[in-house]
Amino acid sequence: MSVVYEAKDIKTISWGSIIAGIVTVMAVSILLPTLGSSLGFAMVEPKSDDPVNGVGMTVGLWTVFSIVISLFTGSFIAGRLAGYDGMIHGFLNWASALLVASVLGAMLVNSSIKTAGSALGSIASATGSMISSGGEVLGNGLSRVGGGGGGWAEFV
């Protein structure tokens, strides 16, 4: 009787490579818009009649280019670091980076809304107190005019 050992190919996911890919996506996502800003400032002509001519289209194209390049770079790093099943690791890197960016974007929007609401509340409070004090001053002035004008009304 002989013993036969069968080697099974166990496929596991290397989360370390995916995290490295996400860090790469975030780093490239920071660097490329910085480069785009410097190119955009070089494109603006302040002395011309239309200083921002074509900037909108350029910003849109550069944004798409930046996102595609950063996701490609991060997925490539995740696939190369995994050592096997690079395509699966690249896809998981893309999906994870998308989730992280969505959460960070939602937090940014939430923070912006809270800040805007707080600022509007402060403005409304200041305006309300200013209107209240203005109404009080106006009321005091009218009561003085009404008190002193009683003799004048009898004269007419």
Image (cartoon, grey):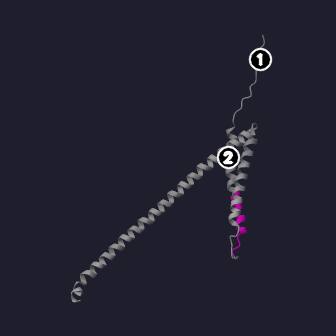
Provide residue 125's location: percent of width, then percent of height.
41, 65
Quadrant of the snapshot with the N terminus: top right
Picture residue at 47% right of the left edge, 63% below the top: 120
Q: Which of marks 2 and 1 is nearer the N terminus?
A: 1
Q: Mark 2 points at which residue?
A: 22
* Residue 95, image quadrant: top right
Q: How far apart are marks 2 and 1 (CA)?
A: 42 Å
Instruction: For label 2, count other residues whose C-alpha is less than 10 Å away and answer few (under 14), some (14-19) or many (20+).
Output: many
Quadrant of the snapshot with the C terminus: bottom left
| Magenta residues (range) | 32-46
Type of the residue with mark 2: Ile
Q: Main secondary structure of the magenta part?
A: helix
Secondary structure state at the residue bearing disc 1: loop
Q: Is residue 149 above or below residue 114?
A: below
Provide residue 57's location: percent of width, then percent of height.
70, 63
Provide residue 47's location: percent of width, then percent of height.
70, 77
* Residue 4, image quadrant: top right
Picture residue at 47% right of the left edge, 60% below the top: 118
The label on residue 69 is: none
Q: Is residue 124 magenta?
A: no
Q: Is residue 33 magenta?
A: yes
Q: Mark 1 points at which residue?
A: 4
